[in-house]
Image (tube, coloured by chain):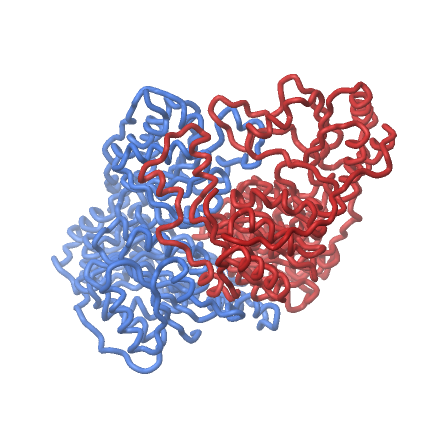
Chain colours: A blue, B red
Amino acid sequence: MTNGARNLLDTFVAGGIEVCFSNPGTSEMHFVAALDEVPALRGVLTLFEGVATGAADGYGRLAGKPAATLLHLGPGLGNGLANLHNARRARSPIVNVVGDHATYHQRFDAPLQSDIASVAGTVSNWVNSATRPEEVADLAAQAIAAAVGPPAGVATLLLPADASWNETAPAIGKVGAKAGFQPVSAERFSAVVDALRAGARVGFLLGSNALVPAGQLAAARIRAATGSLVLTETFPRVSARGAGLPQFDRLGYLGEFARAQLADVDTLVLVDAADPVSFFAYPGQPSRLCPESTEVLELCGPAGDAVAALEALAEAIGAPATAPVSEASRPELPTGALTASTMATSVARHLPEGAVLVDESNTSGIFVAGATEGAARHDLCTLTGGAIGYGLPTALGAALARPGAPVLCLESDGSASYTLQALWTMARESLDVTVVLLQNHAYAILEMELARVGAHAPGGQARRMLELNDPQLDFAALAAGFGVPATVATDAADFDRALAEGLGTPGPKVVVAPLPRL
Amino acid sequence: MTNGARNLLDTFVAGGIEVCFSNPGTSEMHFVAALDEVPALRGVLTLFEGVATGAADGYGRLAGKPAATLLHLGPGLGNGLANLHNARRARSPIVNVVGDHATYHQRFDAPLQSDIASVAGTVSNWVNSATRPEEVADLAAQAIAAAVGPPAGVATLLLPADASWNETAPAIGKVGAKAGFQPVSAERFSAVVDALRAGARVGFLLGSNALVPAGQLAAARIRAATGSLVLTETFPRVSARGAGLPQFDRLGYLGEFARAQLADVDTLVLVDAADPVSFFAYPGQPSRLCPESTEVLELCGPAGDAVAALEALAEAIGAPATAPVSEASRPELPTGALTASTMATSVARHLPEGAVLVDESNTSGIFVAGATEGAARHDLCTLTGGAIGYGLPTALGAALARPGAPVLCLESDGSASYTLQALWTMARESLDVTVVLLQNHAYAILEMELARVGAHAPGGQARRMLELNDPQLDFAALAAGFGVPATVATDAADFDRALAEGLGTPGPKVVVAPLPRL
C-alpha cells in the first residue's frame, strides 16, 4: 500500500511534470514527504505563493508543458491568484495543487477554512477536489489533460489532507497523448481568402499560437504578396523575435495609438487573437479599437492550428516562398547618461542567441522592441493579464524550463516590489537570470494614466500615491538580502558593461538601472 | 456637480474613516485625484496589496473603526486576499474598495477582467458594486455600516471606473449610529448560572469581545468565586495583557495540549468564542477538542454584549468585587546566548506602557506569553486566520490607529518574507514600529508539523522544502533596502540593548534576532 500523495506524484511524473513550485503548509506535509520518494519531481521552494504561480506561468510558457504548484489552502491560493490570472490570459499549462483541510475537518470552520473552489474557479479551466485517496491518481491525470489542452490553462486540484495521507493501492493515472490543434474550418479559411482576393485592406492580428517562427514567416509571406497589415497582439505569451524573423509591430497599448494602427483596415483577421479592445476604459472613448465599419473574421481561435492555417493561406494566394526578415545588427556602445534608449541599445547589443527576454519594463521599456529587431534570436514574454509582479517569477520559471538558455528580465521598480522574493529562489537554484532593475522612483505609467482618464493634475496627496521616492528603494541592498549579487549602473557605458557581465556570468545577477521618468 | 469618487470620499469622512491603505491602478485614478480635495482622508501608499489589507486589519482591530483600502481590480484583490482572510477571522471592520473596469467595458473581457465578486465573497460579509455615480454615496454608507457591525467585518465595494468619474450631484451617504452589542438572552444566562450553582466543573472560553480589561476582570471574579477554568481563545484579535490584569492561559494551538486543558470540563461556556476545534486535522485525532461528554453552552456570540454578560454573571453568583491580577515585575537583564527565552525576557523588560504587541513569532515566541504577564499593560494582536504574513502589515496599521503608542512586532523569518514590503510604508509614514526579526532559517513549525501529521522523517528534498538557509536571508540588508535601519543582535544582552533602543527611538527599526530552532 501507499498513499494518495505518492500516487499524485507518480502520476505527475508519468504525465511529464518535472517541477513543482512550492510553498507548503501543514496540510501539505504528506505531499512534501512524498517528494523524497519521487526524486524525478523537482521541488522548488519559493518564499511566497505569487512567486510559485508566476514561476509556473513562465515554465508553462517556455516548456510548453505544465509544472505543478503546491499552495497552502485558500490564503495560499489568494497569494498566488494574481499570477494565475496572468497565466490564464497566457493560457499557460499549470497543474495548480491547493492543499485543503481533511475532508472530515472542513465542516468545523477551523481558522484556515475558506471557500477555495470559488476563488480557484475565477482563474482555472478545471477545478476538482479529491475526496478519497483512491481518486487522486485519476484526478491528477484529468488535471494534466485539462492543463495541457489545447487550449492550455490552469487546472486546479484541491487536495484534502486525508486524501493525501490515507492509504491506498499504488496507482498511476492514465494521461492520454496531448491532443493536436484543430484544423481551421474551410468556411473561415475561404472568407479570408475571399477578402484578400477582393483587394480589401486586410489586417492580420497574430496571437501567441501564431508567433512561433513558422507562423511569423507564413504571415510575412502573405504580407509580401498582398501588402496586408500584420500586427501582433499587444501582450503575447511568447513571441519569437530577432534577426532572421520578420518585423511586425505590436498593437499599441495606448488606445489612441492602436486605433490609428487599425484605422484603414477593412477586414481584420484574427489568428488566435481577440477582437481588440482597449486595455482600460477612458471617458468618451469606445472600448473596441477597430472602426465600426471593419469586418472582423476569426481565422482560428485558441485551439485552432494557427501555423497550418497561415501556411495554407500563403499557399492559397500564391505568396512568394520567402519574405523579408530582420537582418542581424549590433548597435554601437552607447555613451553618456543612462536612459531608456541607451538601456534598450545595450539589451540589443548583448542579448545572447536563444535567450528568453521577460519584459515587465512598462514605460521604461518603450525603446526595447525597436532596438531588438536585429538582435540575436530570442523569445519574448510579456505581461498577458496586466497583473504586475509577473516578471521576476516568470523569469525564474523560464530559466527552469530552458536550462542552458540565459534569461534576461527587464523589471520596473514598482512591479518588482510585488514579488521580489523570486530573487531568493533564483539564488537557491543557481539560475542564469540577469535582472535589469529599471528604477525611476514612480508608478510612471499611472502618472500618464491619471491624465489620460481625465483626472486633474495631481496635488500633494494624489501625487504621493504615484511616487516611490520617499524613501527611495535600494534594490542593490534588497537583492543582496535575498542572496543575489547586484550592481548599480552609473551611466550608459557602465550599464553596458554590467549587463554583459551579468549575462556572461553563471547564476543570477541584478543590474540596477537608475532612469529618468519618460 | 462633482463625481462619484468625490462623493465616496466625502461619505467615508462623514462616516469616520480617516485612512485609506492604497495600491491603485489606472481604474482608480479618479479616486486618487479626489484625495487632493478631501485631505481629511489620509492616503497611505503600500507597495503590495497584502500590505494594504493587513494594515487595514491592524487599524480596524486597534481603532475599533474601519479604514478603507483601495485595490486594483481582481488581481489587486487577490494579492490582498490572505490578509482579508485574517481580517475576516478577526472580525476587523474594513471598507474594502476594489476598482473595476467601467461598466460598459466589462463585457469586452479586457486583460484585467475577472470575476471580482466571487473572490470578494469568500472574505466579505457585504459585497456590492456601484453601477452609476448616483449610487456611490449610499453604497459607501451601507459598506461602512456593514463593516462596523456588530459583528464587524470586511465590506467590499466594487467601484467601476465610470461610477467614479461620471458627474453627479454632491451627496454624502447617511451613516447611522453604530449599533450596540445585543443583550444576552435570559435563557442562556440562566443556563450558565445553573451550571455554576450545580457545582459542575465549568470552563469559560473567552473570545476577543471579552478580552477587554472589563471582561477579563469580570471573568477573574467568576473564577475566584467558583474555581472555574478560564481560557482565552487561541488566537484573539486583540487581548489586553500585562500587570493589573488577571492571568489566563490561551487554549493551546497543539491539539493534544488543548485536549488536556479541556479534559476535566463538564460544561464549557463560550463567550464570543467558537466550540474549539483543532487548527489542522491530524490522522486519528478528532477535530473537536472538548470531550464528547462536555456540555457546550454559548453565553454570547459575536454580536452579543460579552462584557455585560460576564459582569452580570459575576453579580448573579455573588462573586467578590475584585480578583487576583498579575503584579508588575521586571525581569533581570538576560546574559549569554540569545535564545527564544532571553528574547522573551527582553520583550517583558522593555515593552512600554500602552504598547501594541503584534505577534507573528510562531515557534520562536513560545516564551513570550508567560514572560509578559507582569509586563507593562499592552494590547496583544495574534494571527487570527492562520494566513502568515500578517504581522508587519498589521503592525503598520496598528501604528496608524494608535498614534503615540509604540508598536512592537515579533516577526518570524518565514512569515516576514511574505509581506516584507510593509517596512517601506513604515519608513514613509515615520511610524514608531520596532520589528524583532526572529531568524531561525526554517519554517520551524512545519518541521514540527511534518512529524505530527505522521509523515516520515524528511530526507533531502522534503527537508529542503522546510529550510530557509540556502541562501540565508540578510534581513538587515532587506530592511535597509526598504528604508528602515536595522541591527543584528549578537547575544542576549546586545539584543536587550538594541530592543530598548528601537523602542526608545522615533520611527521604524528592525532588530534581527538570530535564534536556534526550538
| Residue B53 visible in this rendered orientation of the protein | no
Residue B251 point in image, percent of width and height: 63, 33
Q: Quadrant of residue B461?
A: top left
Residue A446 point in image, percent of width and height: 50, 66
Residue A107 point in image, percent of width and height: 56, 27
Residue A351 point in image, percent of width and height: 24, 65
Q: Is residue B198 above or below residue A486?
A: above
Depth order, front residue of A3/A148:
A3
| Residue A325 shown left or right of residue B70 in the figure | left
Depth order, front residue of B450/B386:
B450
Q: Is residue A170 above or below residue B182?
A: above
Residue lying furthest top: B293
| Residue B13 visible in this rendered orientation of the protein | yes
Q: Is residue A26 above or below residue A299?
A: above
Residue lying furthest bottom: A336
| Residue A208 shown left or right of residue B182 in the figure | left
| Residue B227 shown left or right of residue B46 in the figure | right
Depth order, front residue of A478/A117:
A478
Which quadrant is home to the C terminus of chain A? bottom left
Residue lying furthest left: A321
| Residue A248 shown left or right of residue A482 in the figure | left
Which quadrant is home to the N terminus of chain A? top left
Residue at the spot 26% in from the left edge and 54% down from the top edge: A211
Q: Quadrant of residue A324?
A: bottom left
Q: Quadrant of residue A226?
A: bottom left
